[in-house]
Image (cartoon, helix red, strand yellow):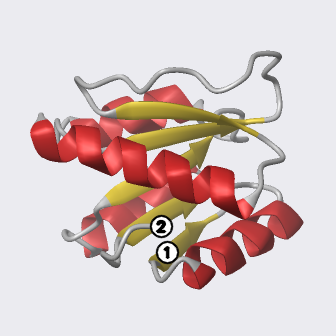
């Protein structure tokens, strides 16, 4: 696991999944900011200029997760984003470097989340 605490914007519309993900992020030593939809995410992002990473569900009720990422990246083009989705049939997908992007299939384990964050942030630092 990484030794750097990150400020993570977590965007998840399912309260129980969000609670679990907040617990996981805190266990990894990160500082989660929780949003239940895209509107809340945009508001939090505006209030916190020091967000290091975004983890968003792709299927939000008010905006698709990829569209939300595009909007957030308009002001922060190199913002690392992890797309979490329950609609994946594949195993781990490769990390994309530009812009730094990863995909994570739900449900996932703590070690899988930690590994994805570490790999994505390593790629983001090199970009």
Find residue 46 and report its horizontal and vertical position in percent. 27, 65
Q: 31 or 14: nearer the eye?
A: 31
Q: Is residue 36 left or right of residue 50?
A: right
| Disc marking residue 33 | 1
Residue at 45% from the left image edge and 63% from the top image edge: 9
The mark nearer the N terminus, 1 or 2, is: 2
Q: Is residue 76 left or right of residue 2?
A: left
Find residue 19 and report its horizontal and vertical position in percent. 77, 74
Residue at 36% from the left image edge and 56% from the top image edge: 53
Q: Quadrant of residue 95?
A: top left
Q: Are marks 1 and 2 in contact (CB under 8 Å)?
A: no
Query: Measured along the vertical axis of the image, is residue 44 above or below residue 55?
Result: below
- Dot 2 alpha-carbon crowd within 10 angstroms: few under 14, some 14 to 19, many 20 or more: few
Dot 2 falls on a residue whose secondary structure is loop
- Screen quadrant of the C terminus: top left
Find residue 13 and report its horizontal and vertical position in percent. 75, 55
Q: CA distance from mark 1 to mark 2?
A: 20 Å
Say if residue 79 shows up in the picture: no
Dot 1 falls on a residue whose secondary structure is strand
Q: Is residue 43 left or right of residue 65?
A: left
Q: Which residue is mark 2?
A: 1
């Amino acid at each position: 696991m990484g030794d750097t605490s990150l400020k993570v914007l977590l965007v998840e519309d399912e309260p129980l999944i969000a609670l679990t993900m907040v617990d996981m992020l805190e266990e990894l030593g990160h500082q989660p900011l929780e949003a239940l939809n895209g509107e809340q995410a945009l508001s939090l992002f505006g209030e916190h200029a020091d967000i290091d990473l975004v983890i968003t569900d792709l299927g939000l009720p008010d905006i698709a997760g990829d569209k939300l990422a595009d909007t957030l990246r308009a002001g922060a083009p190199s913002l690392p984003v992890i797309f979490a989705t329950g609609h994946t049939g594949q195993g781990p997908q490769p990390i994309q470097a530009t812009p730094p992007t990863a995909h994570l299939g739900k449900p996932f384990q703590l070690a899988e989340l930690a590994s994805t964050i570490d790999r994505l942030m390593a790629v983001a630092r090199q970009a």
